[in-house]
Structures are given as C-alpha cells and as structure tokens.
Amino acid sequence: QLSKRLQRIAAYVPKGSKTADIGSDHAYLPCYLCLEDQTAKAIAGEVNEGPYLSAVSQVRQSGLTDRISVRMGNGLEVIEHADQVNVITIAGMGGALITSILEDGKDKLKEVDRLILQPNVSAITIREWLDREGWSLASEEIIEEDDKIYEILVADRGENVMLYEEDRKKKMLLGPYLINEMNEAFQKKWTYEMKNWERILTQFERATETPELSAKKDELKHKIKMVQEVLR
Ligand code: SAM
C-alpha cells in the first residue's frame, strides 16, 4: 500500500505522462504510476547507490523494467532530451535541496510542463523559486500522515503574477491555496511553528541587544504576526 503522501503526489500526474522521479529511493512512486496507468512511463533517478539498488529491484519485482528506467546520477542530470519527460516529481527532501536540484538542472526543464514537489520543510524557498522562474502554482495540498505534516506543491508553466500581488510574503510563506483552505493539518503546522518562534523570541528578549539580534527579532515578530492574522 503506497503512502497517502505519495498517492496524493501521484494524483497530480496526468495520464500518459513520462515522469522523472528524482530522489526516488525505492521507486515506489514511479512503480505506482505505471501500475495504475498502462500508458505511463517513468525514470527513477537516484544519487546514492543503496537507494538506486532498491529502485532497480523494486522495478524488476513489479515487472516494469520496460517502462521504468532506473538511473544513477545527481538531480536532473539523469534526464536526457530524448526521454521527452513532461512531469518531474521531487519528494521527501528539504525545500532548499529541491530548489537547488531544479536550479542546477534548469536546462532540463525546457520541455517539462509540470513540477510536483513535496518539501519536508521550507516550502517558501520553492514558492519563491517558482515565482522567479516563471512557473505558476497550480495547486497545493497539506496533509498529515503518521504524525507528520507534508506540503505538496504543483506548478505548471506560465506566470501567475496576480497570485502574489497582495500579501505576497504571507502567501509565499504559507501558500496561497493552503491559506484559503485552512484545513486541520495547516492549522496544526502553523500553530506549532508560531509557538516555536515565540519560544525563540522569548530567549532573544533575554539576550544582550545587538543590531543583528534586533533584526532577527523583527523578522520573527513579523512572521508571528503574519501567521496570527491567518489563523485568527
Ligand atoms: N522520493 C522518495 C519519497 O518521497 O518517499 C524518497 C525520499 S528520500 C527521503 C530522499 C532521496 O533522495 C534519498 O534516497 C536520496 O538518496 C535522494 N537524493 C538526495 N539528493 C539527491 C540528488 N541531488 N539527486 C538525486 N537523488 C537525491
């Protein structure tokens, strides 16, 4: 049984896609995609040997060696022009790592029309990058599974400037769609984050004032205020 997290990611892959799953580990996601859709094809990319070998064996066990190519390499370097990949999934890593994989492999994105990204932390880094690079956030989800909260960001080609005009910073941090939906996982995540920032702020208040500390305190206060406004 595939995790709810990976099932939700799979839900955004259009039928008949050629998906490159980067950092695929056991290749559970590409195997699921190809078992659910007979017309799907995939590449499972892995930079580390252990996970790469797990992927190879999972694909073989699933009888999908003709439709899933398992490749060892860093980030998007496993993708070749001839592969005609139209969807890229990157899941289960920090937002900064996901962003650096996309940034380093920019030349491989030209023919890709959908990115499905699931950062464990720092979704803001990805939203900022997507906005800068002319991708439009098409959908977002926040879900809880096994006491962990996950965000899923779906981006399509094309700019969406309107989305960020108002309250830009708030939307970048919290997610424009997620703010509107405000589900239980969202409230739980941001209540937790806010309490954490408040704790840090209390510690900062006790320390000797420096210009650097003062700037950090202002930043924390600003973030707390933004979250408070949304959760209210
Ligand atoms: N994507 C799977 C998931 O969401 O369940 C596996 C997530 S696992 C926590 C992260 C995987 O990414 C690891 O197997 C790691 O080896 C791989 N990885 C990390 N950096 C990578 C990179 N630059 N290129 C390819 N794979 C990478």
Image: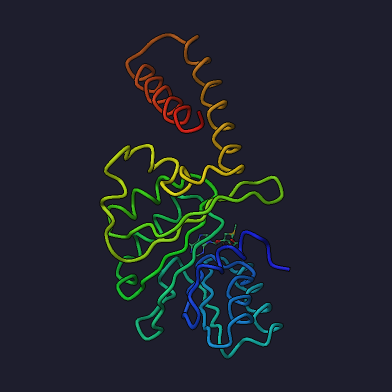
Instruction: Looking at this view, name the residue that lies furthest to the bottom.
Output: 66
> 169 or 178, which is in the foreground?
178
> 57 or 188, which is in the foreground?
188
Using the image, determine if residue 4 lies above or below residue 193. below
Q: How is the image coloured?
A: rainbow
Instruction: Looking at this view, name the residue that lies furthest to the right.
Output: 1
The image quarter containing residue 83 is bottom left
Quadrant position of ligand 1: bottom right
* Quadrant in the picture for the N terminus: bottom right
Using the image, determine if residue 75 lies above or below residue 161. below
**Relative side of 157 to 15, left or right:** left
**Relative side of 106 to 205, left or right:** left
> 125 or 231, which is in the foreground?
231
Q: Position of residue 103 (x, y in %)?
A: 34, 59
Give the residue displayed 51% in from the left and 46% down from the top: 181
**Relative side of 9 to 162, left or right:** right
Give the residue displayed 58% in from the left and 75% down from the top: 30
Label total for image? 0
Q: Position of residue 201 (x, y in %)?
A: 49, 18
Give the residue displayed 63% in from the left and 78% down from the top: 56
Q: Position of residue 92 (x, y in %)?
A: 56, 56
The image quarter containing residue 48 is bottom right
Q: Position of residue 85 (x, y in %)?
A: 41, 78
